[in-house]
Image (cartoon, rainbow, N blue to C red):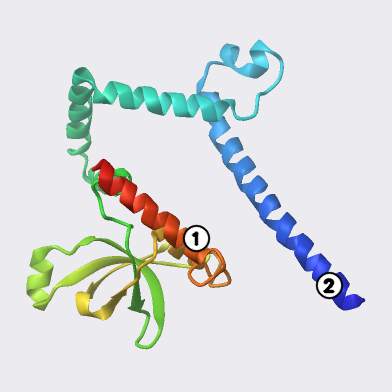
């Protein structure tokens, strides 16, 4: 009887915990982005116009602002403004380093032609015979390869369970093991600390078939 109750309890947790965690993260993100409404004059805020707040309105406002900014930046006049703005930032010592690095990372992540963070590899880290999942981030500068005298690979080694923190390291190409899995699959394993096994799990074959189908469609489009 107790064993059955325990099984039911665990089954219930598997239903509720992901739902509660997802709800908490989404609500935290929405409340955080909703603070963009503070940029509006007080007389134009929802609580002033209609007497109460509208959750998520700040998200819509932020998305619209980003789209409008992108539209203006893509225009001829906008490109000139962006170039002038970046030339000003390039003259400020500390600001130019931060701005340039963030812009390169953002462009790399959202560029369709980029291969950054799109390949999962295994690397022996922090010592031999201890393997970690890592992501290829780009090519190592030739000058650095020339100093060491062999091909290197730039990789990002994320931490668990927060993959946004980690280490950027350059390793010899011969010391990595390439994996035929997607970045999403690798992130699932890292976020779950290895508890979730999307590679050999029951949905692995379906996911693999879907990925192959998507790759075929992309190749046809190109």
Q: Residue at x 17, y 64 (%)?
A: 140
Q: Position of residue 6 (x, y in %)?
A: 83, 72
Residue under circle 2?
6
104 in relation to 60, above or below = below
Q: Quadrant of the C terminus?
A: top left
Residue under circle 1?
206
Q: Earlier in the sequence, mark 1 or mark 2?
A: 2
Q: Quadrant of the N terminus?
A: bottom right
* Residue closer to the observer: 181 or 122: 181
* Residue closer to the observer: 202 or 10: 202
Q: Quadrant of residue 171?
A: bottom left
Whole-angstrom CA distance, mark 1 to mark 2, is 31 Å
Q: Position of residue 210 (x, y in %)?
A: 44, 55
Q: Position of residue 59 (x, y in %)?
A: 53, 30
Q: Secondary structure at mark 2?
A: helix
Query: In the shown orientation, is residue 67 left or right of residue 204?
Result: left
Q: Secondary structure at mark 1?
A: helix
For residue 188, say whether it is visible: yes
Query: In the shown orientation, is residue 167 left or right of residue 172?
Result: right
């Amino acid at each position: 009887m107790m064993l059955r109750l325990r099984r039911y309890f665990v089954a219930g947790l598997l239903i509720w915990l992901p739902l509660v965690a997802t709800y908490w993260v989404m609500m935290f993100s929405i409340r955080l982005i909703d603070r963009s409404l503070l940029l509006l004059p007080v007389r134009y805020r929802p609580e002033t116009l209609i007497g109460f707040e509208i959750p998520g309105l700040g998200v819509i406002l932020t998305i619209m602002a980003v789209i409008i900014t992108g539209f203006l930046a893509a225009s001829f006049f906008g490109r000139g403004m962006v170039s002038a703005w970046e030339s000003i930032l390039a003259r400020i010592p500390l600001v130019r380093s931060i701005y340039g690095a963030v812009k390169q990372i953002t462009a790399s992540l959202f560029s369709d032609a980029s291969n950054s963070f799109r390949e999962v590899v295994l690397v022996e880290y922090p010592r031999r015979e201890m393997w970690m999942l890592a992501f290829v981030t780009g090519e190592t500068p030739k000058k650095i390869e020339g100093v060491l005298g062999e091909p290197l690979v730039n990789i990002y080694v994320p931490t668990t369970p927060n993959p946004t923190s980690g280490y950027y390291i350059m390793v010899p190409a011969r010391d990595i093991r390439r994996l035929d899995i997607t970045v999403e699959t690798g992130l699932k394993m890292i976020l779950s600390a290895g508890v979730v096994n999307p590679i050999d799990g029951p949905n692995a074959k379906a996911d693999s078939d879907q990925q192959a189908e998507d790759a075929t469609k992309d190749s046809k489009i190109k």
